[in-house]
């Protein structure tokens, strides 16, 4: 069986209060989990390991605010508790409870563009 790679994204966007507020050109996601081992007296190796908390960090590149978000006066710097939606041909990935930790911005006159935003998400869900 040949591995052909991951299905690519057809739509990536930010959503707040049920509205699409920005479209995203690309993303890079990283999931981390803490882990602990349990050691026992006299044993040379741990006797057990258990999973700790998960965290998700996502770097978004080239965000464009939607026309309605611009009309509503969107402020990326004031955004909190929003979602990132990644639509792939075979599934939909939603990161919820997002907040930003870093914003890099540049753009042309009259264009609302953020070059790069780093997010932290509370939860990751995958649906069909």
Image (cartoon, rainbow, N blue to C red):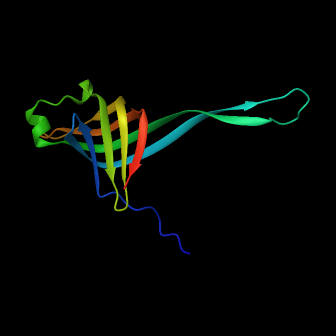
> Residue at left 14%, top 36%?
69
Tell me the quadrant of the picture where the C terminus can be found: bottom left
Q: Position of residue 100 (x, y in %)?
A: 35, 30
Q: Is residue 50 left or right of residue 61?
A: right
Q: Which residue lies most toward the bottom here?
A: 1
Q: Position of residue 85 (x, y in %)?
A: 31, 46
Q: Is residue 127 left or right of residue 50?
A: left
For the question of whether residue 95 can be seen, the reply is: yes
Q: Which residue lies most toward the front here?
A: 128
User: Eyeballing the image, is 51 above or below 89?
Assistant: above
> Residue at left 47%, top 65%?
5
Q: Quadrant of residue 114?
A: top left
Q: Position of residue 77 (x, y in %)?
A: 26, 26
Tell me the quadrant of the picture where the N terminus can be found: bottom right
Q: Quadrant of residue 7?
A: bottom left
User: Eyeballing the image, is 100 above or below 58?
Assistant: above
User: Eyeballing the image, is 83 above or below 80?
Assistant: below
Q: Which residue lies most toward the left here?
A: 71
> Residue at left 44%, top 44%?
29
> Residue at left 89%, top 33%?
43
For the question of whether residue 110 can be seen, the reply is: no
User: Eyeballing the image, is 28 above or below 56?
Assistant: below
Q: Which residue lies most toward the right here?
A: 42
| Number of callouts | 0
Q: Is residue 36 left or right of residue 128?
A: right
Q: Is residue 22 left or right of residue 52?
A: left
């Amino acid at each position: 069986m040949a591995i052909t790679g991951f299905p690519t994204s057809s739509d990536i966007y930010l959503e707040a209060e049920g509205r699409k507020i920005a479209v995203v050109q690309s993303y890079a996601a990283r999931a981390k989990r803490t882990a602990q081992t349990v050691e026992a007296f006299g044993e040379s190796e741990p006797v057990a390991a258990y999973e700790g908390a998960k965290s998700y960090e996502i770097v978004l590149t080239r965000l464009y605010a939607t026309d309605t978000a611009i009309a509503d006066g969107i402020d990326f710097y004031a955004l909190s508790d929003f979602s990132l939606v990644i639509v792939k041909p075979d599934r939909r990935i939603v990161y919820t409870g997002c907040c930003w930790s870093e914003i890099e911005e540049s753009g042309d006159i009259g264009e609302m563009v953020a070059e790069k935003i780093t997010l932290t998400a509370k939860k990751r869900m995958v649906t069909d």
